[in-house]
Image: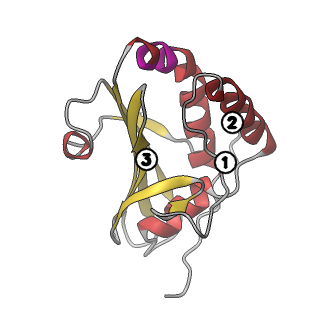
């Protein structure tokens, strides 16, 4: 980790994760302090997801090729489809949105997942940003998939959170 980027720390997931995906099999949460006040959840989500580095885009493209063989859903990471319903953010369907939280995700044959991006004031000059991933596996394929992608998941989430360019946008 370079000193130029603040660290994203693994933290205990919030109790609200159970309401996002009851009966989940996996949950984790990473949190960091963004040096921006008044950051909305949508602004944080866009900063984290919409501009992935090329190595993450390449990993996601590889993932899409492999999972399409199993007829699973693919996501063009970082790219929104303006005609998609439900609306997308960074390629993921938007499940719910408020000023403090954005929830992305979908249900598929092998597993259901949600990504929660939450913000909270952190003193007079910062915002606490938390990214939680909640997964419920539906079968052996889902459990195998989750075990396979877990090392990549941890690396990607931390990198995206640590390298996000958080900026408060005018309302």
Left or right? Give the position of 132 relative to 85. Answer: left
User: Is residue 28 one of those drawn in magenta?
Assistant: no
Q: Looking at the image, which is closer to me, 70 or 136?
A: 70
Q: Please report the residue visible at 54 percent of the width from the left and 60 percent of the height from the top.
A: 89
Q: Earlier in the sequence, mark 3 or mark 2?
A: 2
Q: Please report the residue visible at 35 percent of the width from the left and 72 percent of the height from the top.
A: 99
Q: Bin the neighbour count of mark 3 within 10 Å (Cα to Cα): few under 14, some 14-19, many 20 and up.
A: many
Q: How many marks?
A: 3
Q: In which quarter of the image is residue 54?
A: top right
**Mark 3 near mark 1, Cβ–Cβ under 8 Å?**
no
Residue 48: image x %, image y %? 58, 54
The main secondary structure of the magenta stretch is: helix
Q: Name the residue under label 2.
A: 60
Residue 28: image x %, image y %? 38, 32
Q: Which of marks 2 and 1 is nearer the N terminus?
A: 2
Left or right? Give the position of 161 relative to 98. Answer: right
Colour scheme in use: secondary structure
Q: In this view, does 71 lie above or below 92?
A: above
Instruction: Give the distance between the C-alpha atoms of the residues marked 2 and 1, in whole angstroms.
Output: 8 Å
Work out which residue is located at the far bottom of the displayed protein and give it: 171
For mark 3, give the secondary structure. strand
Q: In this view, does 108 lie above or below 48?
A: above
Q: Is residue 18 above or below residue 26?
A: below
Q: Which portion, as a residue range, is magenta?
A: 142-147
Q: Residue 105 carries which label?
A: 3
From where the camera sits, is residue 126 visible?
no
Instruction: Give the distance between the C-alpha atoms of the residues marked 3 and 2, in whole angstroms.
Output: 15 Å
From where the camera sits, is residue 90 visible?
yes
Q: Mark 1 points at which residue?
A: 76
**Mark 2 near mark 1, Cβ–Cβ under 8 Å?**
yes
């Amino acid at each position: 980790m370079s000193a130029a980027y603040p660290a994203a720390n693994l933290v205990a997931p919030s109790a609200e994760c159970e309401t996002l995906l009851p009966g989940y099999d996996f949950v984790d949460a990473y949190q960091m302090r963004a040096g921006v006040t008044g950051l909305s959840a949508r602004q944080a989500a866009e900063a984290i997801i919409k501009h992935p580095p090329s190595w993450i885009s390449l990993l996601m493209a590889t993932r899409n090729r492999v999972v399409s063989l199993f007829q699973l859903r693919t996501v063009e990471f970082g790219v929104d489809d303006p005609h998609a319903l439900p609306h997308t953010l960074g390629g993921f369907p938007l499940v719910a949105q408020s000023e403090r939280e954005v929830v992305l995700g979908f249900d598929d044959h092998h597993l259901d997942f949600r990504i929660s991006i939450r913000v909270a004031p952190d003193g007079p000059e910062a915002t606490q940003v938390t990214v939680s991933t909640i997964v419920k596996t539906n079968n052996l394929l889902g459990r195998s998939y989750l075990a396979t992608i877990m090392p990549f998941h941890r690396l990607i989430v931390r990198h995206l959170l640590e390298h996000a360019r958080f900026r408060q946008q005018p309302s």
